[in-house]
Amino acid sequence: MLGANVLMPNLSPRNVRKKYMLYDNKICTGDEAAQCIECLKKKIGKIGYKIVVSRGDYIK
């Protein structure tokens, strides 16, 4: 299976996140990075997918 969707978790320190708010209603804005990734894993898992954090290079 191949994919091209990108998730953008909040990895910036909480005290500077307002500078990086690219769109309204972004999730997990008050969470630490580890909390955000766990939240995303649960949400994605509910629809039958999993988060992959590798580079995604194509290998024949």
Image (cartoon, grey):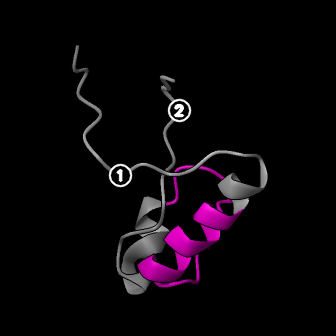
Q: Position of residue 55 (x, y in %)?
A: 25, 40
In the image, residue 10 lies at what x, y percent? 46, 67
Residue sitting nearer the eye, 30 or 58? 58
- 53 and 7: which one is in front? 53
- Taking the magenta stretch, the answer to whether it contains residue 10 is no
Q: Which residue is mark 1?
A: 53
Task: Determine the residue located farthest toward the top in the rendered image.
Answer: 60
Determine the residue located farthest toward the right in the rendered image: 46
Horizontal arrangement in the rendering, residue 33 relative to residue 28 (left or right): left
Q: Nearer the viewer, residue 44 or 7?
A: 44
Question: For the magenta stretch, what is the residue range?
Answer: 21-42
Instruction: Report the disc number at residue 40.
Output: none
The disc label shown at residue 5, or none: 2
Q: Secondary structure at mark 2?
A: loop
Q: Are marks 2 and 1 in contact (CB under 8 Å)?
A: no
Which numbered disc, 2 or 1, marks the residue closer to the eye? 1
Q: x%, y% of residue 12?
A: 35, 72
In three-dimensional space, the C-alpha distance between marks 2 and 1, rounded to whole angstroms, equals 12 Å
Q: Residues within 10 Å of mark 1 (few under 14, many from 20)?
A: few
Going by the image, does 11 lie left or right of 2?
Answer: left
Q: What type is the residue that disc 1 sits on?
A: Val
Q: Horizontal placement of 60 versus 5: left or right?
A: left
What residue sits 49% from the left and 39% below the top?
A: 6
The residue depicted at 55 percent of the width and 83 percent of the height is 31
Q: Amino acid at mark 2?
A: Asn
Q: Residue at x 56, y 73 (%)?
A: 38
**Is disc 1 placed on a helix, strand or loop?**
loop
